[in-house]
Amino acid sequence: MSRNARVVWERRTRTPDVKPRVIVIGAGVAGMAVGCYGQMSGLETRIFESHVLPGGCCTAWARDGYLLDYCIDWLNGTAPDNEANQVWRELGALDGKTVTTFSEFNRVVAQDGRSVTFHTDPDLLQAELESCSPADAAEIRAFCADLRRFGRVDIHPFLTPPPLMSWREKLRMLGKVLPAFRLFWRTGGTQMADFADGLRDPFLATAFRNMFFQDPQNFALLPYHYTMSQAHKGNVGVPQGGSLGLARSIEERYAGLGGRIDFRAKVVRVLVEDGRAVGVELRNGERHYADHVVAACDGLTTVSKLLGGEHSNPRLDTLLNEVLPDPEQLYPALVSVFVGFRGDVGADEPVSTTYLLPDEDAARLPGALQKSLVVHLRSRVLAGLAPEGRSLIHCNYFSDFETWKALRKTDRRAYWDLKRELAAFIREFLERRFPGIGERIELVQIATPATTERYTGNHRGAILAWKSPRADDLLDELIAKDKLALPGLAGFHLAGHWVGGGSLIKAASSGRFAVQYLCRELGVPFRAQESGGTEPWHAGKLGELPQLDNWTERPRAARPTARTSRT
């Protein structure tokens, strides 16, 4: 919404017959969840978003007929009858959509061509892994036995924060947790790296670490078991419409509930009076007032800039001042290379493959943190990403942030040249894997960690925030003990992956939790209802798609139609 069309919330006081007003900072999945649940609970909410699209990192953009889907590799909660799915039903996220599930999670290929496929079926997985390394049969059987045990676990704690659970809800949860306590304790306390180091086959050890496409490091076994078992049950998949489709569906649900999002509206300060958040100030100087403010944006930005460093709590301080500076605690940033081309690759190619690279190849990935590259056949999973007769590949790898940020800031031309060099390597690499693809490539677009930070505000371009057990413990306490609030600051709550956890379902759940807490503070009942939308999903629901910055690659005789976009 343009500045001239924007209505300023000037009201400073409220009579008892007027709905409480809530301002939400950020229209990511968490922010829109806050808006939806606030509207359901009888509040008047309004979201201020600095970008032109909803969704934050859960987004896509268009280029030359291709839709470059950035975020969802898999989504938790795509099957019915669990709390994760209930959250998505309440938010309308899956309304009218089909879901693509998969029986193979990822394939890992060594430099010598040796490979292993991580099936979601534990029986198939066990047979595959034992065939790969008979010497590790005992460890493989133990891993797959735990995978089967997780398949019998039905715990999805996404509806109510522990302090607000009724005794009946707590007893029901306890009844589910106790039988699985030793399983959680053992897999949650064992790092994947430690498990892999115990294997005799070096390739299989590396493959295990890359089960989730790349090695996140400092990651426990539990999320591997949980995600794989849920995928086998059909509760992990990719919804029709992809990342931006998910965001647009939640936006549609929010608008249907009477909410409004102001785009191109960057919040620069939370207004505080007498120890209470009373509104926000936008970059253009506008001040909007409300009864409550929820920050669903970057956590460090919230504390250090929006609140001027004057409000925090001990756990948040520990996260931002001790955990955040340690690169081992933060989920790495990602470089994404989208490749659009005529035709397709072989039908027997797996949807996702992690290639372990020799030193000379790894050296050509700028800022690479590992010697590996993920090749994801994106248009195999999501229809509509490529024009008819064409396909889209998404290559990505973990990268350090400074390489890209510093260069873009100090030497923009060198930044573009580095992207051009990366594009050239990706062409060569794909040509080796799929002979003849090079001359069919029409588009190459690269999004760097600097791109992610620039368009979403995420600190250091990190998409999933934290990855360490220490951070997980602090997040649990932020939710259960601090109630997503800050001591000495009334009328204010936090939401999003920096305080609720990195996945999309945790971000949405943090929005639900925040509204439950703020409803209690405002003295209004929390309400949630399923959307019930049945209109079939169609591409028109994506709305107008931004083209971002557009720059045509310097012509090459062999590839005159190829493009690389700078973002």
Image: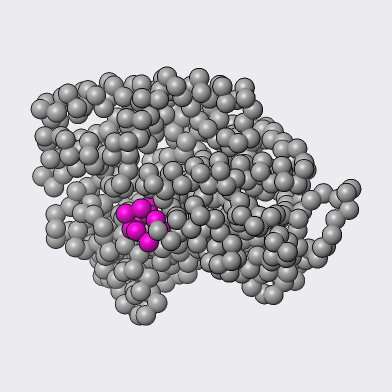
The foreground one among 388 and 284 is 284
Which quarter of the picture shows residue 459? bottom left
- Quarter of the image that includes the C terminus: bottom left
Q: Which residue is drawn at 39% across and 47% down?
A: 470
Residue drawn 23% across the image and 51% down it:
372
Residue 556 in picture, x, y percent from top left: 28, 70
Of residue 54 and residue 327, the one placed in the foreground of this image is: 327
The span picked out in magenta is: 323-332
Left or right: residue 29 compared with residue 270: left
> Residue at horizontal 69%, vertical 61%?
275
Magenta span: predominant SS is loop
Whether residue 72 is visible here, answered yes or no, is no
Count numbered badges in the picture.
0
Left or right? Give the position of 396 relative to 542. Answer: left
- Which residue is at the front of the view, 171 or 292? 171
Residue 47: image location, x then y, percent? 67, 56
Can residue 405 be seen here? The reply is yes
Q: Tell me which corner region of the image, top left, top right, bottom left or bottom right, holds residue 447.
A: bottom left
Q: Is residue 352 left or right of residue 164?
A: left
Question: Which image quadrant: the N terminus?
Answer: bottom right
Placement of 364 over or under 80, stated as above or below = below
Identify the residue shown where x is 38% and y is 29%.
184
The spot of residue 262 in percent (x, y) is 68, 61
Q: In this view, does 294 lie above or below 6?
A: above
> Residue 16 versus residue 351: which sits nearer the camera?
16
Query: Residue 361: x, y in percent?
Result: 17, 58
